[in-house]
Amino acid sequence: MKKLSLNIKQRKKASTLLVLASTEIEAIDVLLNNNLFREAVVHLYFASFYISHALLCHKLPSRPSHNNVENQLHHVYGRKKTFPRRYVKLHSMLHKLRTEIDYRSSHSPEPSKLKIFFKQITAFYKFAYKVIPEIQNDDILQDILDNNQDKIKDFSIDIYCPKTYFHHTRITVWFPPFYLKIFRTTNVVSHTKIFLKKLKIKNSQNYVAGLNSKLDQYSDRHLLMFDIDSIDAEVEATLKKIGGLLLKTGRGFHFIGKNVIEGGKEWTTTLKKTLRDPVLKQRIDKKHIAISLQRGYSTLRITGSPSKPIIPQFFKEF
């Protein structure tokens, strides 16, 4: 099946749904390993619901009903030769099983069957991830640029070893925003890693790229950036007041603010204020902020490598 043709809004919605599905899959794994089989059924179904919704985000309203998703899945993909019909059947079976376990039965489902469902839902997720066009790093930078047209003079990316914060080879690449229409940032990263390899830099294959907060080579303009361990409704409400993008990085998140902070002193004050925020202070990575203040700018990883295999994925926009 070819990649779906989705506009930027639809791609953002689909990415959010796939991240939610991946979180459900993580929960299923934990529940099955702890013999919590009834609980696993609910998460199996919601993983399928989010995946199916993502595949249908160009066909469905923003908040579709469960029956709406199932009916559209059958209607759009049920007879499509390039779409595996087993995933349509899987969704219907999980929907039926979840309804039965939640409302009609007190018995525990068969563990061996749930383990098969888990393998199938993981395969369904991988299939959807391949055919849904993702939000690229360049899309994120363009979003930030559109929000601050006259304030961004340069973007910069660091290529560095993710295993150490200090005293290691670190390359910074600066480029004016108009280059977003000329080259992809992924090309910059791949060519820089070839350069590192030719210089015989140790473990250069494990290097990753990170977006930097600093937006001007010759003056202090920054974006607010920080690592955050977990989110809930309270955290999301706080981030909404700041405004920005949230990327999922395995079990944690990266937050990139969309508003430019004028001046290094104001940037430092804003980071320190974030450390004191009653909601955020218990969830943000304090070490990351301390290193950022020492270095004079923040960096958040945007690519993967063998040592950091999970690529940060667009989750939400505030």
Image (cartoon, grey):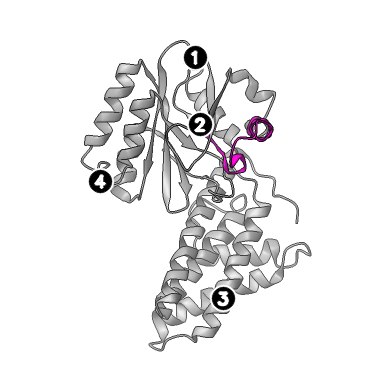
Query: Element type at marker 2?
Result: strand
Q: Amino acid at mark 2?
A: Leu
Q: Amino acid at mark 4?
A: Gln
Residue 282 — which label?
A: 4
- Of the two numbered discs 3 and 4 in the rendering, the one whose residue sits closer to the viewer: 4
Q: Amino acid at mark 1?
A: Gln
Determine the CA span between mark 2 and mark 1: 14 Å
Can you say whether 74 is above or below 128 in the image? below
Residue ID at (38%, 87%): 106
Q: Is residue 120 within the magenta segment? A: no
Can you say whether 75 is above or below 111 in the image? above
Q: Are marks 4 and 2 in contact (CB under 8 Å)?
A: no
Question: Which tag, 1 or 4, sits closer to the chain's start?
Answer: 1
Label 1 crowd bin: few (<14), some (14–19), many (20+), radius 10 Å: some
Chain part drawn in magenta: 188-210
Residue 117 — which label?
A: 3
Residue under circle 1? 217
- Of the two numbered discs 1 and 3 in the rendering, the one whose residue sits closer to the viewer: 1
Residue under circle 2? 211
- Of the two numbered discs 2 and 3 in the rendering, the one whose residue sits closer to the viewer: 2
